[in-house]
């Protein structure tokens, strides 16, 4: 099983990831995609890192850091959440934080590696994601990765700009 591609590696969360996660989680510019409403403290993030030592079967979630091979620096994170072992499915969330690093293939490769891991190691039958209808980049990313649109929740998400639809996507593994 490989967790390394040509551009990135997916790796476990380490204690020194608290600082980059602190920046990512506390950036109001990305709160609309994560559903965050309030800042996270370093202490909260340290507890989260400590909990990552537990198995996905216990916590029902797992975060992997997206690390650029060229620089060895974390550029984002990929989350499996709402893991359902009985139904063999999980939700996927992904973030490449720095806008200058988006569009370079990091997220595509991370999603490809995760899909392989989910199928071969976790034995999942499907992955799913929910994306705001206006988030064209994320919709394109998931569609390129083989996710298909399975529905739309009307006026599902609220922001300062008003309500917007949420697109449901699934990929059978």
Image (tube, grey):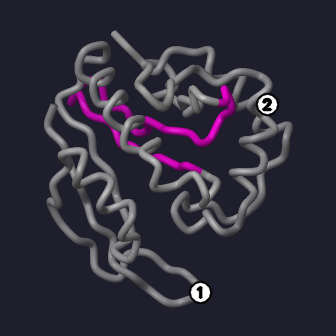
The tag on residue 46 is 2
Q: Position of residue 88 (x, y in %)?
A: 23, 27
Q: Calculate the distance from the C-alpha at mark 1 to the C-alpha at mark 2.
A: 30 Å
Does the magenta stretch mainly form a helix, a strand or a loop?
strand
Q: Residue at x 54, y 89 (%)?
A: 161
Q: Is residue 170 left or right of residue 164?
A: left
| Pointer 1 residue | 160
Q: Residue at left 57%, top 15%?
A: 54
20 or 36, which lies in front?
20
**Crowd around label 2: few <14 · some 14–19 · many ≥20 (10 Å):** some
Please tell me in which quadrant of the rendered image residue 139 appears.
Answer: bottom left
Q: Callout 2: helix, strand or loop?
A: helix
The percent coordinates of residue 102 (x first, y second) are: 51, 55
Looking at marks 1 and 2 on the same chain, the residue that comes earlier in the sequence is marked by 2
Q: Residue at x 67, y 30 (%)?
A: 71
Foreground of the two, 173 or 3: 3
Q: Would you call the spot at circle 1 few (<14 residues within 10 Å), some (14-19), or many (20 or more)? A: few
Q: Position of residue 150 (x, y in %)?
A: 14, 60
Please check the rendered image and state whether residue 82 is part of the magenta-colored stretch, yes or no: yes
Q: Quadrant of residue 83?
A: top left
Boundaries of the magenta span? 71-96
Q: Nearer the viewer, residue 76 or 59?
A: 76
Which is more toward the observer, 160 or 7?
A: 7
- Answer with left or right where residue 128 lies relative to residue 70: left
């Amino acid at each position: 099983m490989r967790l390394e591609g040509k551009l990135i590696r997916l790796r476990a969360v380490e204690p020194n990831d608290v600082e980059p996660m602190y920046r990512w989680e506390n950036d109001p510019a990305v709160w609309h995609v994560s559903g965050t409403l309030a800042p996270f403290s370093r202490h909260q993030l340290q507890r989260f890192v400590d909990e990552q030592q537990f198995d996905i079967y216990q916590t029902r979630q797992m975060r992997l850091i997206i690390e650029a091979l060229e620089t060895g620096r974390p550029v984002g994170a990929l989350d499996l959440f709402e893991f359902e072992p009985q139904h063999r499915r999980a939700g996927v969330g992904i973030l490449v934080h720095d806008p200058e690093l988006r569009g370079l293939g990091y997220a595509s490769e991370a999603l490809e590696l995760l899909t392989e891991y989910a199928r071969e190691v976790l034995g999942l039958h499907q992955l799913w994601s929910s994306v705001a209808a206006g988030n064209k980049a994320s919709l394109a990313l998931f569609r390129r990765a083989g996710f298909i649109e399975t529905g739309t929740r009307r006026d599902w998400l609220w922001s300062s700009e008003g309500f917007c639809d949420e697109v449901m996507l699934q990929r059978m593994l």
